[in-house]
């Protein structure tokens, strides 16, 4: 039984508790009536106990709260009136709990109507049994109880509505924060924010625009409920004092356009706005922790409208969540970039090379093709560092990486292992003769003089090449073979290309 109560709503638990308590309280009265052979009391108590217990059973098995709440209220009203009619004023004081309970069980207007009828009929049945002084005060007490119960019920329902609204907003916030914490895709998070805004604001359509890399345009991040024809306008929107989103991005301040049809900044888009049935637009810039613009969050309405202070606060909360999501995405991208790319040459580092090489070997194995792995080391690089300084050495490495990328195809992979060592993975190379031509091309390109600090610097390269699967079938062995071949090229005069052989 306890397990069945855990997943029930608060309303179910309250109604079950009320009906259970009422059954237990009234049951002794039924026993007393039976023992005293009072037929009128037996009838009234039997109807009350049987009816309330039936409601308890109905709620327990069907969970239809509204239906059985109404039945409970009607049963209480009818039963007490029957009891008063049969037994007189002795039961009239049961009207107080029934009046109070009605406002919980029924809608306010229905409860007020039922309670007025209840008091009127009960007083009609019993007015002859009271003197005028007592009857007047009794009626007054019923009226006061009814008014106080009505006001308290209105207050509690308003409080409950606000709590439910806050709980709903908190649930949206928590869902979005969970998406951010789990590093979900930014597009998914932005769509969740847009849907949350639309759920909280009546007749609202939300769009989120992101600042493009050049910081001159806004690109579409999310606009799940806006007419797709309007997406073309939003995507690639130039930052200027035109429209609401672009103006908010331009000024860094909130922009409220109550009527887009008459606002001068919207004149250029009047036809499209009319097609999309947009009447007003509120735009809020999304500003990062460093004061930099990240994008805009805009809310559109189909009717002319101005946001209330509470809506401003709600918008600010969702803008803040959007800021967190965007900055988290940027941080993740920076971390991933730093973890996988060489900071100086911007080439993949050893970590990302391993991933690329694993994928390339798997593809070559599946397609029954070869791979060629070349390792190159710059000759006399240390001399450049020693004579011209580390800044010159860095410049040389950057220029070297550019020349390497200029000699390979788009699907080939170039990486920097560290120092002046580079790895190149040539995908789909079939013959050693082809690799010999590519190796010479690479060697000649790297041997051309470099202009560093207004001086001509010569720095050649020694290159070692090995093949998958002919020379080895795993990454570590392939890299070791390429290193041995490169070392052989260095020991035999440098500035040349050597292929791995089993004799090395």
Image: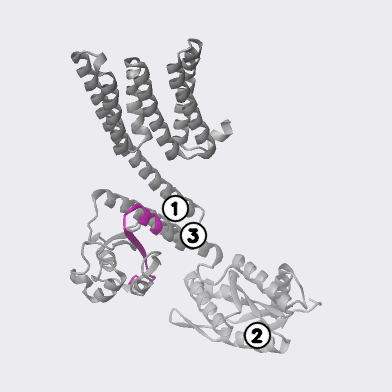
Query: Marks 3 and 2: CB-CB under 8 Å?
Result: no
When asked about the image quadrant of residue 264, the answer is bottom left
Mark 1 vs mark 3, foreground winner is 1
Which range of residues does the magenta coloring cover? 194-217
Q: Residue 176 — which label?
A: 1
Q: CA distance from mark 3 to mark 2?
A: 37 Å
Q: Which residue is mark 3?
A: 332
> Per the image, is 85 magenta?
no
Mark 1 / mark 3, whichever is N-terminal = 1
> Per the image, is 213 magenta?
yes
State the quadrant of the C terminus. bottom right
Residue at image coords 27%, 30%: 116
Q: CA distance from mark 1 to mark 3?
A: 17 Å
SS state under label 1 = helix
State the quadrant of the N terminus. top right
Q: CA distance from mark 2 to mark 1?
A: 52 Å
Dot 3, how many residues are within 10 Å of its Cα: few (below 14), some (14-19), or many (20+)?
A: few
Q: Residue 439 — which label?
A: 2
Q: Is residue 396 above or below residue 418?
A: below
């Amino acid at each position: 039984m306890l397990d069945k109560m855990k997943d029930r709503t608060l309303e179910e638990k309250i109604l079950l508790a009320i009906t259970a308590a009422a059954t237990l309280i009234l049951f002794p009265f039924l026993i007393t009536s039976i023992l005293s052979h009072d037929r009128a009391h037996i009838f009234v108590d039997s109807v009350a106990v049987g009816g309330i217990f039936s409601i308890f059973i109905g709620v327990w098995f069907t969970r239809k709260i509204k239906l059985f709440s109404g039945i409970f209220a009607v049963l209480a009203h009818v039963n007490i009136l029957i009891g008063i009619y049969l037994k007189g004023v002795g039961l009239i004081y049961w009207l107080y709990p029934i009046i109070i309970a009605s406002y919980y069980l029924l809608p306010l207007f229905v409860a007020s109507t039922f309670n007025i009828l209840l008091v009127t009929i009960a007083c009609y049945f019993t007015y002859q049994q009271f003197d005028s002084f007592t009857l007047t005060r009794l009626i007054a007490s019923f009226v006061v109880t009814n008014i106080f119960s009505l006001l308290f019920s209105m207050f509690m329902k308003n409080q409950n509505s606000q709590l439910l609204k806050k709980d709903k907003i908190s649930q949206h916030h928590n869902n979005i924060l969970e998406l951010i914490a789990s590093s979900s895709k930014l597009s998914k998070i932005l769509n969740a924010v847009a849907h949350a805004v639309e759920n909280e604001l009546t007749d609202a359509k939300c769009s989120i625009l992101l600042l493009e890399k050049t910081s001159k345009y806004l690109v579409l991040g999310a606009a799940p409920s806006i007419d797709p024809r309007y997406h073309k306008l939003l995507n690639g929107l130039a930052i200027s004092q035109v429209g609401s989103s672009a103006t908010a991005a331009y000024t860094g301040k909130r922009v409220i356009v109550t009527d887009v049809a008459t606002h001068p900044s919207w004149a250029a888009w009047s036809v499209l706005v009319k097609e999309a049935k947009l009447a007003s637009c509120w735009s809020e810039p999304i500003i990062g922790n460093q004061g930099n613009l990240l994008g805009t969050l805009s809310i559109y309405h189909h009717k002319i409208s101005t946001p209330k202070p509470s809506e401003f606060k709600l918008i600010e909360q969702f803008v803040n969540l959007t800021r967190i999501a965007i900055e988290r995405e940027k941080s993740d991208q920076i971390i991933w970039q730093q973890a996988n790319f060489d900071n100086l040459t911007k080439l993949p580092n050893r970590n990302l090379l391993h991933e690329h090489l694993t994928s390339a070997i798997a593809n070559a194995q599946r397609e029954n093709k070869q791979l060629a792995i070349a390792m190159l080391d710059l000759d006399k690089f240390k001399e450049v560092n020693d004579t011209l300084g580390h800044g010159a050495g860095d410049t040389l490495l950057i220029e070297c990486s550019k020349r390497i990328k200029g000699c390979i195809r788009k699907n080939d992979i170039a990486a920097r292992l560290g120092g002046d060592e580079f790895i190149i993975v040539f995908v789909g190379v079939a013959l050693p003769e082809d690799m010999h031509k590519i190796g010479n091309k690479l060697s000649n390109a790297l041997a051309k003089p470099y202009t560093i600090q207004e001086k001509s610097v010569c720095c050649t390269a020694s290159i070692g090449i090995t093949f998958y699967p002919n020379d080895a079938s795993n990454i570590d062995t392939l890299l070791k073979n390429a290193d041995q071949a490169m070392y052989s090229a260095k020991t035999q005069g440098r500035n040349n290309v050597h292929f791995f052989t089993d004799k090395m």
